Image: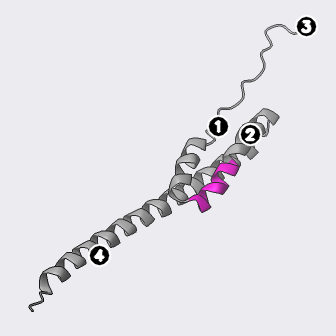
Amino acid sequence: MQPNYTSPQPQQINNNMTMSIVAIFLFWPLAIPAIINASKVNPLIQQGDYAGAQAAAAESKKWSKWALIVGIAWYVIAIVCCALGGIGAIMGAETSTTSY
């Protein structure tokens, strides 16, 4: 029996699963690798591979950020194009008057 022996507490590593799930709604092609890497973090921690878990978490964060950036940019471009198209339609309707 070993006196005062406590097992070491596993490191807490954020797996970024929440950010990966949010990213899938914005740009799913880049969010899929983020979710795959995020799902690897907890099993690696349980195996004691803290370096591997940290690397998987970093990859998950990288892919999630890219998915968020691309997705938000895509939506902004779509909104701007729709707004400009609507303004163009309004301007075109005002200038084209037909008289019979």
Mark number, residue 13: 1
Q: Nearer the viewer, mark 3 or mark 1?
A: 1
Q: Quadrant of residue 91?
A: bottom left
- Residue found at x 63% / y 41%: 15
Q: Label 3 crowding class (10 Å Cα cut-off): few <14, some 14-19, many 20+?
A: few
Mark number, residue 80: none
What is the three-letter code of the residue carrying label 1? Ile
Q: Position of residue 87 (x, y in %)?
A: 22, 74
Q: Secondary structure at mark 2?
A: helix
Q: Nearer the viewer, mark 2 or mark 4?
A: 4
- For label 3, the residue is 1
**Span highlighted in magenta in the image:** 28-37
Q: Are marks 1 and 4 in contact (CB under 8 Å)?
A: no
Q: Are marks 4 and 3 in contact (CB under 8 Å)?
A: no
Q: Nearer the viewer, mark 1 or mark 4?
A: 4
**Distance from the alpha carbon under mark 1 to that under mark 4:** 47 Å
What is the three-letter code of the residue carrying label 4? Gly
Residue 6 lies in magenta, yes or no? Answer: no
Q: Are marks 3 and 1 in contact (CB under 8 Å)?
A: no
Mark 3 or 2 closer to N-term?
A: 3
User: For this view, does 83 lie left or right of residue 32?
Assistant: left
User: For this view, does 70 lie left or right of residue 57?
Assistant: left
**Distance from the alpha carbon under mark 2 to that under mark 4:** 52 Å
Mark number, residue 85: 4
- Residue found at x 72% / y 24%: 9
Q: Main secondary structure of the magenta part?
A: helix
Q: Nearer the viewer, mark 3 or mark 2?
A: 2
What is the three-letter code of the residue carrying label 2? Tyr
- Residue found at x 67% / y 56%: 33
Q: Label 4 crowding class (10 Å Cα cut-off): few <14, some 14-19, many 20+?
A: few
Seen in the picture, residue 62 relative to 83 is either above or below; the reply is above
Mark 4 or 3 closer to N-term?
A: 3
